Amino acid sequence: MSITEWGWNSYFETFWQRGNRKSTVPARVVRQQREFWRVAGDFRECWASASGKLRLAADDGADWPAVGDWVAAEVHGKDTTAVIQEVLARRSKFVRKSPGKKVEEQVIAANVDTALLLSALDGDFNPRRVERYLAQCWESGARPVIVLNKADASNEALQKAAEMQRVAAGTAVRVVSARTGQGFGELEEFLCPGHTVVLLGSSGVGKSTMANRLLGQTVQDVQAVRDCDSRGRHTTTTRELFVLPGGALLMDTPGLREMQLWDAESGVAQVFGDIDLLAAKCRFGDCRHEAEPGCAVRAALSTGRLDPARVESRRKLCASRNFSGEKWTPKRDKKKNRESRKFIANNG
C-alpha cells in the first residue's frame, strides 16, 4: 500500500514540506504495543521504536505516538526496523483522562475522520453514556455517528432510536445488527477510501463483531455478554488500524469502561446546546439552576420541555471536566502545539 492509501493527503503533505526531514520518511502508526509501534508507508511495514529525542520530549505519555498518527520515521536496512523521530501535527485526536487516580492525558486515537459511537439496543442501552462519548468526539475534531447495534436482539429498536435522536445534537443515528448485517448499507457513506474511522463504545456493545463484519473476516475475538447486565469483557487488547475491503481505514480500540472527559468544554457545549440556550435566558448570568428566581432551565424542567436526566448528565460531565482542568495545567501543550494549532487554523 502507498501512503495515500493509508490516508496521507494535502494537509499532511503541506505540513511535511514545512520541515527539514531529509533523513526520514512519512509513516503512519498502524498498531501499538506498549513502547513499540508498527508503521507503514511507501515501504514494507515494520516495527519502530522512539528516538532518544522523542523520549526526552514526551511528557506523561501525551506526546507518545498513537495509532493513527503520522510520524517522521528513519527506516533502517531493507525495511526491517525504524526509529520514530517526530510525531506530526494531529488533525484530530481522541483524548481521555488516563484510567485510575493519576490525572494525565491519554491519546487513544489520532487523525480520525469519523467516530462510530456504538451503543447496544439490549440491556446496556444508555443515552447518558453516549452523551459522554459525543462530548469527547466533538472536542477531538472527528465527526461522530451514533450506531445502535444489536437490532436483531431488540423489539424496541425504533423507539430507542427516537430516544437517542433526542440527545444526538444533530448527529446521525444508524440502527444496525453487526451479527446479521442488518442496516450496514447505511454506513457506506462514512467508509470512503483513505477515510479513517474509529469504533468507540463500552465493552459488550459489539465493537469486535462490528469490526469483523466490516472486514468480512474474523480478526477480533468475540465473547458473550453477561445475562445480568448485558455488559461484556474486554476482547480487544491492542489498538490497531485495519484496511477495509473498500479502502477505508478502521481503527479498533479496547473497550472503555472508564470514560472521563479531558478538557472537553466545547464538546460539552455542542452536546448540550439546548440547555445552554435556555441558561442564557436565566435572570442571573451565574445561575446554578437550583433555587435562583427567574431560572429558565428550571422553568423548562417544570413544564416537561427539558429532561431532568439530561440536565443531571450535563452537570456530571462539567464536574468531570473541571476536575481534570484544575488538577493539570497543560504547559507543554501551549508550547509544543502552538505551531500545530496555528497550522490547523490556516489549513484545516
Image (tube, rainbow, N blue to C red):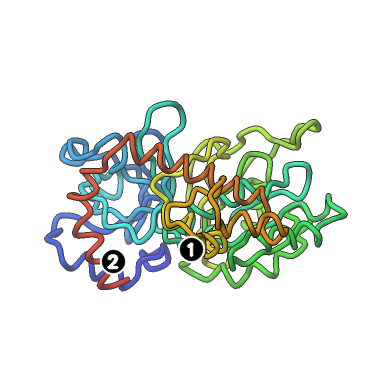
Residue nearest the observer in this picture, 114 or 155: 155
Quarter of the image with the C terminus is: bottom left
Q: Are marks 1 and 2 in contact (CB under 8 Å)?
A: no
Residue 9 location, x and y as percent?
A: 34, 70
Which is nearer the N-term, disc 1 or disc 2?
A: 1
Q: Looking at the image, which residue sits at the far top? A: 101
Q: Is residue 80 left or right of residue 112?
A: left
Q: Amino acid at mark 1?
A: Ala
Placement of 301 over or under 63, stated as above or below = below
Residue 267 can be seen, yes or no: yes
Residue type at mark 2: give it.
Answer: Ile
Q: Which residue lies at the image location 62% right of the left edge and 61% below the top edge? A: 168
Question: Label 2: which residue?
Answer: 344
Q: In which quadrant is the N terminus drawn? A: bottom left
Considering every residue shown, the one lying at the far front of the view is 293
Marks 1/2: CA–CA distance: 31 Å
Element at label 2: helix
The residue identified by callout 1 is: 280
